Image (cartoon, rainbow, N blue to C red):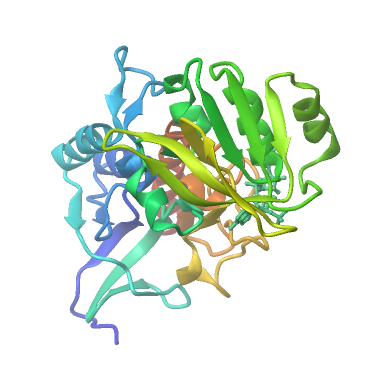
Amino acid sequence: MSDNSKKIENVIIIGSGPAGLTSAIYSARARLEPLMIEGEEAGGQLMITTEVENFPGFDHGITGPNLISVMRKQAERFGTKFITRNVTKVDLSKKPFEVTVGKEVYLAKSVIVSTGASAKYLGLPSEKVYMNRGVSACATCDGAFFKDVEVGVIGGGDTAMEEAQFLTRFAKKVYLIHRRGEFRASKIMVERSLKNPKIEVLYNTEVTEVMGDENSMNAVTLRDTVNGKTKNFPLQGLFLAIGHKPNTDLFKGVLDMDATGYLKTRPGSTYTNVPGVFVAGDAQDPIYRQAITAAGTGCMAAIDAERWLEANH
Ligand code: NDP
């Protein structure tokens, strides 16, 4: 239930990765006093990344959690307010918009959605154990740490092809591990992978276990999906490229999204189909998925929201 005596925020930002925090910095500096609902696991995918070496401005790199921490301080310095809880419901059919957190309802003239995406994992307990100790879901982020070693990439889509090719710049050998006999990826991407002398494809193969010592992984168990036979296989790195899931369930049936759940924007902007609701970062980006591109669209969303508020309120 909305409460008429309640404060109406200029902008509520949902999600606290680089997209949300950048939109908070910009909208706070525009004196909009944004309210960020940052989630209980604040910070997004960077919180599970070790070294970030490709974010401009940090010549010696920075860890993912530190990068989030400095961005958050910067947003706070200009007056962003934070709520460290998860949004449970949104009602974008009402004006002001309603954003519910448990029993609390927050009202807003505009909303920036920056809920991000999550990499899909196999779901093995051992994969969790070796996360960031050999197991990664982002070759662009972590590939450079795998110089002259043998690594595996799991998946048969375009991401797997791209990541496998990228990893050949560093790794001695890349095993492309796919559960079926044919790839889902586009022909040209498959051709490039098959032509690359450093890539070897393991068809009809699943990883059922990740093994290692207390420092890092050093082997996996492979299962042949045709005859069920298993074997241990030495590998120093394992990259998951089995897809991402945008965190957009809250907006189903309300905001336009593609079949996977990525929110659609008006081209060249962060406008969604609901006026006053903007989206930034991985929740709308199946292609680039980088911290810097998320931050860039976060800036766009804040500017879009500011101008929209100016024209409509
Ligand atoms: P996809 O959904 O296209 O592919 C996921 C792959 O992972 C599939 O081959 C799937 O196998 C496999 N997989 C899924 N779950 C498991 C599991 N539990 N165990 C083992 N394997 C699994 O995701 P992508 O990230 O590759 O691509 C997403 C979208 O982005 C696509 O539309 C793609 O075309 C696009 N893209 C485009 C690029 C470009 O054009 N440069 C680059 C990267 C992505 P199976 O085939 O058996 O289902």
Q: In the rendered view, would you say 18 is above or below 196?
A: below
Residue 137 seen in the figure: no
Q: In the rendered view, would you say 136 is above or below 10?
A: above
Front residue of this view, candidates 77 and 62: 62
Residue 169 seen in the figure: yes
Picture quarter with the N terminus: bottom left
Picture quarter with the C terminus: bottom left
Q: Position of residue 269 (x, y in %)?
A: 57, 44
Q: How many marks?
A: 0
Residue that protrudes farthest toward the top in the picture: 59
Q: Position of residue 73 (x, y in %)?
A: 17, 37
Q: In the rendered view, would you say 75 is above or below 119?
A: above
Front residue of this view, candidates 143 and 59: 143
Q: Position of residue 267 (x, y in %)?
A: 65, 45
Front residue of this view, candidates 302 and 87: 87
Q: In the rendered view, would you say 244 is above or below 53?
A: below
Could you tell me which residue is drawn at 29 percent across and 47 percent down?
Answer: 43
Lateral position of residue 24 relative to residue 97, left or right:
left
Q: Image quarter for residue 105? A: bottom left
Could you tell me which residue is drawn at 74 percent across and 45 percent down?
Answer: 203
Lateral position of residue 132 relative to residue 159, left or right:
left
Q: Position of residue 121 (x, y in %)?
A: 49, 54
Could you tell me which residue is drawn at 51 percent across and 33 percent down?
Answer: 234
Lateral position of residue 40 relative to residue 234, left or right:
left
Lateral position of residue 208 relative to residue 309, left or right:
right
Residue that protrudes farthest toward the bottom in the picture: 1
Could you tell me which residue is drawn at 46 percent across and 22 percent down?
Answer: 146
